[in-house]
Amino acid sequence: MSTYCERERNRLMRLSLLPYSFKPIGLTLFILAFAGLVISKFYVEDPNAYRTVLRHLTLIGLLFISISREKTEDEMMVRIRAQSFALAFIAGVIYAVFYPYLNVVVDAALGQSETNLGDISVYQVMVFMLLIQIGFFYQIKRMHA
């Protein structure tokens, strides 16, 4: 007989994932939104409104890919997914901390007089973390196959 705390812990430990059918939807959404970002940069007069919506769509597409089930979701996939999220988090923190300093070094190497040690955008960090998570997930999955 399990206690209430054990049942709640088990409920929280289960990761609710999207169905596998969301993976191709996310990939399509990401590709179309990314293409839209590239096109809006060159062909739209005032791309700010478009860019905000398209950035959100790229994040949603990457998130769909990241949290969609695999065709065969088992304990190994759950462990690999958790590992890839942990690695992506660590890489994201390192990226957020060191990227501004790397900008200063690159600007100095290129001879630019003004260097900016400002923060990076949340969008940039989120896309980086999701891409790293997806990449690590499939790399680790391939190593265990």
Image (tube, helix red, strand yellow):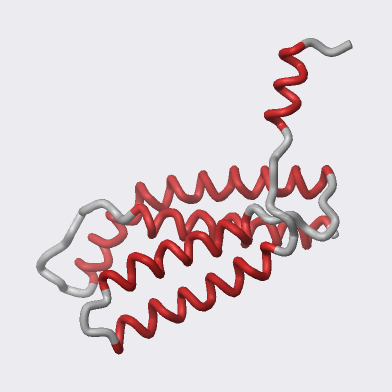
Left or right for 49, reference 113: right
In the figure, residue 99 lies in which quadrant?
Answer: bottom left
> What residue is at 26 percent from the left and 71 percent from the top?
48
Q: Quadrant of the N terminus?
A: top right
Residue sitting nearer the eye, 113 or 60: 60
Location of residue 141 in the rendering, given as x and y in whole percent from the top left corner: 76, 57
Left or right for 113, reference 4: left
Furthest-right residue in view? Answer: 1
In the figure, residue 42 lies in which quadrant?
Answer: bottom left
> What residue is at 77 percent from the left and 20 percent from the top?
7
Location of residue 110 in the rendering, given as x and y in whole percent from the top left corner: 22, 74
Location of residue 70 in the rendering, given as x and y in whole percent from the top left corner: 77, 58
Q: Is residue 11 placed above or below 87 in the rendered structure?
A: above
Residue sitting nearer the eye, 1 or 128: 1
Location of residue 54 in the rendering, given as x and y in whole percent from the top left corner: 40, 70
> What residue is at 79 percent from the left and 10 percent from the top?
3
> What residue is at 64 percent from the left and 53 percent from the top?
67
Furthest-left residue in view? Answer: 113
Q: Is residue 125 placed above or below 50 in the rendered structure?
A: above
Residue sitting nearer the eye, 142 or 28: 28
Q: How many marks?
A: 0
Q: Quadrant of the C terminus?
A: bottom right
